[in-house]
């Protein structure tokens, strides 16, 4: 992620619909599928720490990020259980965590190597929760600014997980309501702006932010209960076999 986006993330994590929805989604999934009443959780790619504050309400939260800048913001929030490291060499003991989350992170990594490390640090039958950008045909300049390596489909993510010893218990697309607007707006912005001048997709008016939060909350509950066939994102819950 571009360095300028860490400051933006730190300021918006508490109020922006995107961040709020992801945290609420993970809490719903943990409460539904996790067998531990006080889970030990790892947030890989913890960013500026907003997710960890929420996860700490239901268990013991640990965070890892490759960026010193991100960890500086975590400590500014008063979060100390964070380490600098990479997804291919996690600085934790084997079978240490009940839950591992990678929220909009896997697309930045060497995903096959990352999944091997997640397998190592998860307890048997531990949960692995992932959220990733969906559909390669949605690729835009924003993906380049965010340093994405790829976007996923339900099939490609399922094959990746199964190949590395995970059993999928829930997978669904998310943010169906955003699909057409995102495709149009990002294509136009990619035409109008250069990479250096491209405005952040996170800048919204407060009224639009409230509307999107309402729509996202409705969709999240539908997706957890059933499955959405399309969306700009894709989430998955898997168990270490």
Image: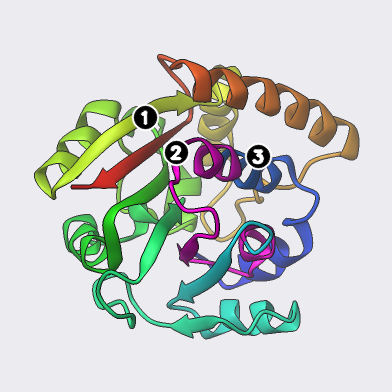
Residue contact between numbered discs 1 and 2, judged by CB atoms under 8 Å: yes
Q: Residue 33 carries which label?
A: 2
- Of badges 2 and 3, nearer the viewer stands 2
Instruction: Residue at 80%, 36% (x, y): give it.
Output: 209
Question: Is residue 38 rendered to the left or right of residue 85?
Answer: right
Per the image, label 1 sits on a secondary structure element best described as: strand
- What residue did someone put label 1 on? 170
What distance separates the C-alpha of mark 1 from that of mark 2? 10 Å
Q: Quadrant of residue 151?
A: top left
Chain part drawn in magenta? 26-55
Q: Nearer the viewer, residue 49 or 195?
A: 49
| Cβ–Cβ under 8 Å for marks 2 and 3 | no
Residue 183 shows up from this direction? yes
Q: Residue at the far left: name it.
A: 163
- What residue do we see at 51% from left, 55% from top? 195
**Residue 80: percent from the left, percent from the top?**
62, 85
Q: What element carries label 2?
A: helix
Q: Which of marks 1 and 2 is nearer the N terminus?
A: 2
Residue bearing mark 3: 21
Q: Where is residue 56 in the image (x, y as percent from the top left)?
A: 64, 64
Query: Residue at coordinates 56% horizontally, 26% vertically from top-left?
Result: 175
Q: Name the one closer to the observer, 37 or 134.
A: 37
* Distance in Å between CA atoms under marks 2 and 3: 18 Å
Q: Is mark 3 on a helix, strand or loop?
A: helix
Q: Of 227 and 66, which appears nearest the observer?
A: 227
């Amino acid at each position: 992620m571009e360095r300028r986006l860490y400051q933006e993330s730190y300021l918006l994590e508490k109020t922006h619909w995107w961040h709020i929805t992801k945290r609420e989604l993970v809490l719903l999934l943990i409460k539904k599928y996790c067998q531990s009443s006080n889970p030990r959780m790892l947030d890989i790619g913890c960013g500026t720490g907003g997710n960890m504050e929420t996860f700490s309400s239901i268990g013991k939260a640990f965070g890892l990020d490759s960026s010193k800048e991100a960890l500086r913001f975590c400590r500014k929030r008063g979060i100390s259980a964070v380490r600098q490291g990479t997804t291919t060499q996690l600085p934790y003991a084997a079978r240490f965590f009940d839950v591992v989350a990678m929220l909009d992170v896997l697309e930045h990594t060497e995903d096959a190597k990352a999944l091997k490390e997640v397998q190592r640090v998860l307890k048997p039958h531990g949960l692995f929760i992932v959220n990733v950008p969906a559909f390669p045909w949605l690729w835009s300049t924003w993906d380049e600014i965010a340093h994405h390596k790829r976007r996923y489909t339900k099939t490609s993510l399922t094959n990746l997980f199964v190949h590395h010893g995970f059993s999928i218990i829930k997978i669904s697309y998310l943010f169906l309501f955003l699909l057409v607007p995102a495709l149009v707006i990002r294509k136009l912005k990619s035409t109008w702006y250069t990479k250096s001048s491209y405005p952040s997709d996170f800048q919204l008016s407060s009224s639009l932010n409230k509307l999107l939060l309402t729509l996202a909350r409705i969709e999240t509950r539908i997706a957890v209960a059933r499955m959405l066939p399309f969306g700009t994102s894709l989430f998955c819950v898997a168990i270490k076999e």
